Image (spheres, coloured by chain):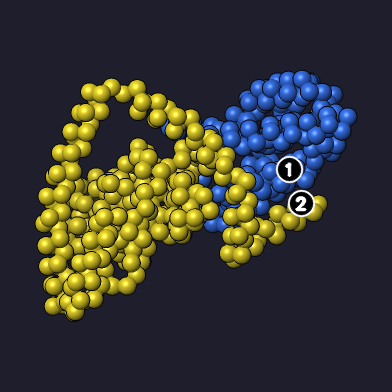
Amino acid sequence: MVAVIASVVLLATEYSSSKLIPLRATLSFFVDPLKYFVDLPTVLVDQAADSVSSYRTLKMENERLREEQLIHQTRLLKFEALEKENIRLRALLENSFKLGEQVLVAELLSVNMAPYEHIVVVNKGTRFGVHPQQPVLDANGVVGQVFRALPFTSEIMLITDPNHAIPVQVNRNGLLTIAVGGGQLNRLVLPFLPSNADIRPGDLLITSGLGGTFPQGYPVAVVDEFTSQPNKAFATITATPKALLDRNRELMIVWSKSTPVPLISKPTANEAETQTDAVK
Amino acid sequence: MQLNNYVGFFRIILTLIVAMCLRIAPWPGEMSAFNPDWVLLVLVYWSLTLPDRVGIFHAWTFGLLTDVLTGRLLGQYALAYSLVIYICLKLHKQLRQFPFLQQGLFVFFCLLLSQLLLFFIKNLQHPAQLHASFWLPVFTGTLAWPLVYGVLRFVGLSQRIK
């Protein structure tokens, strides 16, 4: 029963230490092609749909995207001024300010790892510098964090996984709390707020930046139900994630710069940095 | 004979690889909870029909690969698969005489044992409340057994794997 002993030893070592990461990476060389292979039909269907869509639909989509881009660019014009203003105000408060994030676009592989866990696989791995605990976003909000990075793929735990918790803040009044995954793709739970907390349906929850994993200020979810029972100490609050967790194929993996931007001393360097990041 | 042996070996490996693909294939929506453990079904079939070719080593190796594939703690599928295949190898002579229905019952218990081991290991990691759908693959796996049996029998017979 060498096999049993070997597997128990493996289980014990991996549970208690991180020594087995190289072994997993090596084995993933054999296994990761299967993930790409299983994903192939989806890719082919997408490509086929692209190639048969008519000139008219393409033109319409193009126009719509152009309009959207115009709107976003006008908003960004103001954003830059606001950012500078924010840095100046923070300087008055003698506070350091973190900004400048790099993103990498990763595409979802449509494979299914374990049905009772909200873990998805994307097509970028340690080859692209992805590492565990990186935040992952989409165009609408926070999606989750990198759970495990393999050479060619990485596994991402969604914020709705029952084992996931994310520190958040109510955008309206800055109330801090923690949002825990509800186990369904459209549900987050806020279990740690007292019955008299100032929170109402429709409030936007943003990342608070506490805990250090997620950068501050990204939208996470919208509160959709608040019930307080007088006989219980904590209110029952549920929220719906902003990110389209079950519909988006493109996700963004974020690198946040660990060094805070110097306050007012070197404005030119700041400018250059934000410029390059905007391009990326 | 030698060549035939190699061909047979590749056939077996190929069926296992197909099973691994099926294991992670996406099912529409919430249906993915029904996806049975194809790798174990295929391993059980080969260990019953060709006990001298597919043994605990195969079970352990493919269990380990399944661990990596599905992102589990390394070794848990390896442990479950090797134990189940050990039982299959011990009992394969009796099982071949059994009527089909009884074989199905045996497969059900194999799947249940494997899932129980996984449940046990998962609880050791962190006591989590699991959805009742965790046990669904055991039932769908039993229902899928005739299909696996038929297909693999066809694969085996067409090549006369000895």
Residue hosting label 2: A3
Q: Is the same chain shared between marks 1 and 2?
A: no
Q: Position of residue A7 (x, y in %)?
A: 70, 54
Disc 1 and disc 2: Cα gap in Å? 9 Å
Asked whether residue A38 is in view, the answer is: yes
Residue A108 location (% of width, % of height):
42, 42
Q: Which colour is chain B painted?
A: blue
Quarter of the figure with the C terminus of chain A: bottom left
Q: Amino acid at mark 2?
A: Ala
Image mark for residue B59: 1
Is B156 left, or right, of B70 in this rendering? right
Image point (46%, 37%), residue name: A110
Residue under the image location 49 percent in, 56 percent down: A126
- Is label 2 in a helix, a strand or a loop? helix
- Say which chain tag 1 marks: B
Q: Residue B55: where, in percent of width, then height?
A: 80, 41
In terms of image quadrants, where is residue A244? top left
**Residue B8 appears in which quarter of the rendering?**
top right
Nearer the observer, B84 or A83: A83
Q: Residues within 10 Å of mark 1 (few under 14, many from 20)?
A: many
Is residue B109 visible in this depiction of the protein? no
Which residue is pictured at 63% across the width and 26% down the height?
B144
Q: Nearer the viewer, residue B111 or A262?
A: A262
